Image (cartoon, rainbow, N blue to C red):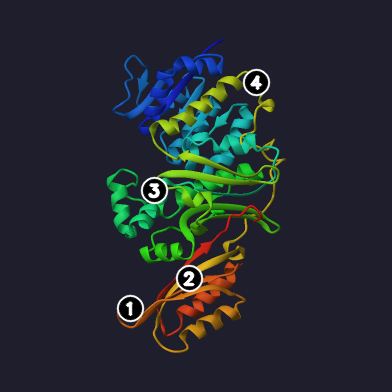
Amino acid sequence: MKPVRVGICGLGTVGGGTFNVLTRNADDIARRAGRPIVIEQVAHRSIHPDCDITGINATSDVFEVATNPNVDVLVELIGGYDIARELVLTAIENGKHVVTANKALIAVHGNEIFKAAHEKGVIVAFEAAVAGGIPVIKSLREGLGANRIEWVAGIINGTGNYILTHMRDEGRAFEDVLAEAQALGYAESDPTFDVEGIDAAHKLTILASIAYGVPLQFEKAFTEGISRITAEDVEQADNLGYVIKHLGISKRTDQGLELRVHPTLIPKERLLANVHGVKNAIAVMGDAVGPTLYYGAGAGAEPTASAVVADLLDVARDISTEHRYRVPYLAFSGIDEDVSQLPIMPMEDIITAYYLRLLAVDRPGVLARVATILSEQGISIEALIQKEATEGELVPIILLTHRTKEKQMNEAIREIESMADIAGPVTRIRVESLSEGE
């Protein structure tokens, strides 16, 4: 059959990995696709050192690839928002299919991109945008297609998981492990997107849209980072039978959909609690299949390239199929008419349990007053640890509460922090069981 001709934009870590996988495994890929997949052109500003493009048509202008009549599929691996958006829309306008690993692009501009692609009858594939080489998008969109998805929860940022893993295993401070992650190349010099939950929120937005058939709504995702987590919190969570993980969580409720990224205490026996280092894992609860787990490398040159090339295989198989018979971009048919209007719930309406850590003056009645404040907000205490006084006669108090609404907890924390006998802000970490019956 006629080869599928690919133009790769970006030859950095993922682009170089994609180039190498396509060339190294060309025969097996052609057998799986039913036709050869050949690299027609590449666009780059720099080249990954392991990537040899000798004999390949190369340019420094990505838009040259988007308008090249000999290119069937544009592979967008330049990252970012604005230029990537313009590049992808230009490729679509020129009738080209698109494969991308850009989670920020899909989370923020996906609705616009999919609408344009639908009108032109072209494919936009983005498996590599979430969890690197783990085929979780295909699993949600196709493998679990018979299910009503109840919730999705995952470790979808390897940097944050690396930091929390080493804080727990070695009792080290956040700043110390972050510096190590940066030295090893796991974290950027500016780690904000990773440690403050923005990267994970991009990915969760995509997963939630596919799981529930709602528009991409990144701007409504709640994000909270891990920079305030201390070695003390990690130790106390362990004492209480929990592990702290930076989770993206989306749940279907009677009031709407939850869409949130934050540090979370989960029971030690849960599979997600035992995902370590830079690995990613996503748990999905379907009404028919029950709980499923998808685990593997969430980043890296060839793991991510694995997902990019898998998308190219799908494009090669479907390129001759009429558009209406292809798998929908976000799992549900249509662009507007079949989109669910389930609202995204504000964070203050979310119900969960809580871990609280506070420093109090070692004085009679302080703990009773804290308990009264919680009780007045309808919050009951499940467990309490009061440690010996530290220097300055401050007593660390650890509380584990039953499930309550975030709005009530916010008000209780405000009142507790206003007490004269409380030193500094209260540390609050949400607690999730992620059990089969939840």
Residue 356, numbered label: 2
**What numbered label is drawn on residue 321?**
4
Q: CA distance from mark 4 to mark 2?
A: 55 Å
Q: Is residue 194 above or below residue 337?
A: below
User: Given the image, on which type of amino acid does mark 2 rest?
Assistant: Leu
Q: Amino acid at mark 3?
A: Thr
Q: What SS does tag 1 mark?
A: loop
- Earlier along the polypeptide chain: callout 4 or callout 2? 4
* 202 or 140: nearer the viewer: 140
Q: Residue at x 30, y 48 (%)?
A: 182
Identify the mark nearer the N-term, 4 or 3: 3
Residue at numbered disc 1: 390
Badge nearest the viewer, 4 or 3: 3
Residue 361 at x, y = what percent?
Answer: 39, 84
Q: List the residue tagged with mark 3.
A: 159
Please, what secondary structure does the residue beneath circle 4 have? Answer: loop
110, above or below 375, in the image = above
Could you say where residue 62 lies in the image, as x and y percent from the top left?
41, 28
| Callout in the foreground (4, 1) | 1
Looking at the image, is 265 positioned above or below residue 146? below
Earlier along the polypeptide chain: callout 3 or callout 2?
3
Upstream in sequence: badge 4 or badge 1: 4
In percent of the image, x 57 and y 44: which residue is there? 207
Q: Nearer the viewer, mark 1 or mark 3?
A: 1
Sequence-wise, the earlier of marks 1 and 3 is 3
Report the amino acid beneath label 4: Thr
